[in-house]
Amino acid sequence: MSEYTPEEIHHHVKTYVMVFVALAALTIITVSISYLDLGVLPAVTLALIVASIKGSLVACYFMHLISEKVTIYWTLLVTLAFFLVLMFVPLSTMLVQAKV
Amino acid sequence: MSTDYHKESFFTKYIWSTDHKIIGLQYGITALLWLLFGFILMMIMRYQLAYPESPIPIVGALLGDGGLLPPEMYNSLGAMHGTIMIFLGVVPLAFGAFGNYFLPLQIGAIDMAFPKLNATSYWMYFVGSVVMVTGFFVPGGAANSGWTSYPPLSNIATTGQTVWLCGMVFLITSSLLGSINILATVIQLRTEGMNWMRLPIFVWVQFITAFLLLLAFPPLEAASVLQLMDRLAGTSFFMPSGLVVSGVALSNAGGGSPLLWQHLFWFLAHPEVYVLILPAFGIVVEVIANNTRKPIWGYKSIVYAVVFLGFMSFIVWAHHMFITGMGTSMSSFFQTTTMIISIPSVVILTALFMSLWGASIRYNTPMLFALGFLPMFGIGGLTGLPLGLAAADIYLHDTYYVIGHFHYVVAPGTIFALFAGIYYWFPKMTGKRMNETLGKLHFFFSLIFMNGVFLPMMAQGLAGVSRRLWDGGEMYAHAAGVLYLNEVMSISAWLLGMTQIFFIVNMIISLMSKKTGESNPWGATTLDWSATTSPPLGHGNFEVVPTVYRGPYEYSVPGADKDFTPQNEKV
Amino acid sequence: MDIPFTVKERPDTGLYNGKLGIWLFLASEVMLFGGLFSAYVFLRTGAESWPVGSDILNVPMATLNTMFLITSSVTMVMSWASLKLNDFGKFKMYLGFTILLAFGFLVVKYFEYTAKFEHHLYPSTNNFLGIYFTMTGLHVLHVVGGIIVIFYFLVPGNKMWQSDPDRFVNRIEIVGLYWHFVDLVWIFLFPVFYLL
């Protein structure tokens, strides 16, 4: 049930503020990393790691995914699986093709 | 939602209705009309193929040029026949009409979860379908790059392609809203006692179909947006560098990839194949269980097979792209997944054949169509196997063999199942019965002529005749031996068209006949028959919302007082 | 008869209809943007040369925009929390801030786009700019859609707070989920286009 007591809500609000601070800090970090000349591969990896952390924070706390119902988890799990297929399978066909 | 259904105006009752039954009928009627329209386009094409040099009768007057069909127009007809049949005809009929009307009834829901969204979904579909067809009236005619719209051809095609893409965006949005609705309805609105393993197979297939539409359609929407950008804003997402058309180098920046479109397109369009066939399975299961008067064989196997089929359908799409030269390792991957995905189809088909075993079958019209479905879909499925293997596919790709294969799946397969559904549920929708004699004539002639159209295609395809030839292959020596088949197929196609008159006449006289007053004429066990009147009440469906006590196919239960035990009958 | 579980949760799933609906919608949105990200990766990997985003695009402006959207996400969730605490005034204040920040985002985006056009950088210039304009453009459309819906609940739709408060809270939660998703997409768009 999504019925929260006022105390819980107050607790939530504290979490939101903390998440906000974390998001702002991570934004600054990712921008500053981009000004270092790291080369493509480390830069991409770092930027995607930071973005994933930020995305997870938003999803888990703002979207309350951290305490969601099992139906939603299943839906998103299936979506995630097909998302990964969509991202990487076309790419791999091209990479294999480029080698031929 | 308005619970007061006595004071509805004509507008809220028939136009902007939020009642799932009215929306189902709206979908059904619109889709049937589009099916007829798509069929007429095909009949024109068949005339051109059978008699390439003669003017087209009747519609020839509209074409100018002495009634001869220009090649561009032939391409338009081909592209629009495919698009209309799939996106405007079969899917809206199978998913929009049957899903909307019978799914809530079968799970004991008083309506869909989001009635207004449901109405929006229908009108999105309606607008999209009209937009799609206005393509015929823009300069250069309707989209003429095939229903697959492969770039770079589609990027440099006439305005009709832009119209096609706009229509597609509407249709995709409509499907998304519809699938969200179906999913939420099944998950949230199952009545008391209707747990997952008591759902009729029809509900299961609609549920999985909705998942496919929900997750497979958006990448095509993305691709459509990209192609619109290519066509309107001059980007080069699908345009390779250095393209020369008619001796003129194109001014695009280049650097794009036509294969990108193929990936995004087939990421939708392969699951789409299962969107076309799964609802057909569901209808056939309902009809067979009812007319064999025994429980369906292997309920759980069918359910797991359907779920597995849905999941696998997302990782087989590149078997449409073997000739793009994706390299042996990726080809092997997609060949393997393609062979694996044929297993659940075989499981379902086997379960259905097993269900017939030892039954005292009632050979009424819906059952005949369902029985016709089984071997026809079997042929369609088996002829697909060579296409799933790269070595054979390289030879057969883009020949009439492919056309024969998928038409066996969709035309005598899905369309037969949809007819079975119409004959089966007509008494539920209207409270009247359809004429059996006309129905049987409709079935037998359809069966003969369907095979008359599609079987020769296999022969032509194996001889190597390309599917895209405007003259039916006249200029190719290797086609000479099978060229006479063009006339056989065309005559079968027109006779098939004539056969549908049985259906139309049957529909009209049945609608004009008196109500029979029976609510469950077939003696069926599912809630749509056992818990509602025929036709069901306006908003709300049920007098009392039913409670479910048992599985969906309890026919001929030993010791029971009649040969069917409805799901809502107390233990 | 009314459709069940429009406000109260269904006991076995623990969800009310709208919440499931919006998550299903977001799942399809994941696949929509997934298709575009996939296109981006495909085009970039296949390209002979690909420009560095920060050479062409304005990183400080985009950083500002990131801050706008992150903040608007916080105010959105705060407005929901205020409703849960029965504080309608604070709810309106936070929701107002959300709209304001969203407009801020659009204004910055407007200046970014026009600056590109002034330098004769169009979608047709190269595939980097093409996919940049397409994806951020689609994202902007999502922001605009969000603004319309949020405005509806801030002004004409807020009467429901009196007539059916539980349902109103649910609706705000649903709008919030959508809005956070828009924020989430931007969190990925920002590094992908500006920083890499």
Image (cartoon, helix red, strand yellow):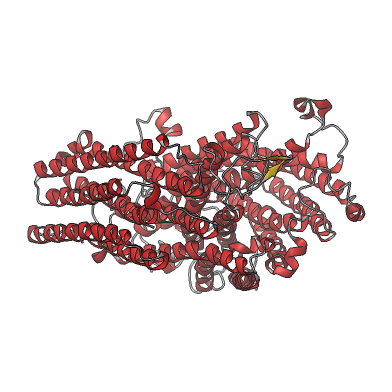
The reply, left or right, for residue C145 in relation to residue A90 is: left
Name the one closer to the observer, B186 or B511.
B186
Relative height, residue B159 to residue B220 (above, below): above
Relative height, residue C72 to residue A89 (above, below): above
Name the one closer to the observer, B120 or B433.
B120
Name the spot of residue B476 as percent of width and height, x first: 88, 51
Relative height, residue B63 to residue B23 (above, below): above
Image quadrant in which you'd find residue A24: bottom left
Name the spot of residue B194 as percent of width and height, x first: 38, 63
Q: Residue at x 37, y 59 (%)?
A: B187
Image quadrant in which you'd find residue B288: bottom right
Q: Is residue A30 visible?
A: yes
Name the spot of residue A96 as percent of width and height, x first: 59, 69
Q: Quadrant of the N terminus of chain A?
A: bottom left
Q: Quadrant of the C terminus of chain A?
A: bottom right
Name the one closer to the observer, C75 or A54.
A54
Please state the total of marks drawn on the protein image: 0
The reply, left or right, for residue B314 in relation to residue C76 is: right
The reply, left or right, for residue B52 in relation to residue B112 is: right
Q: Residue at x 54, y 36 (%)?
A: B232
Name the one closer to the observer, C91 or B383.
C91
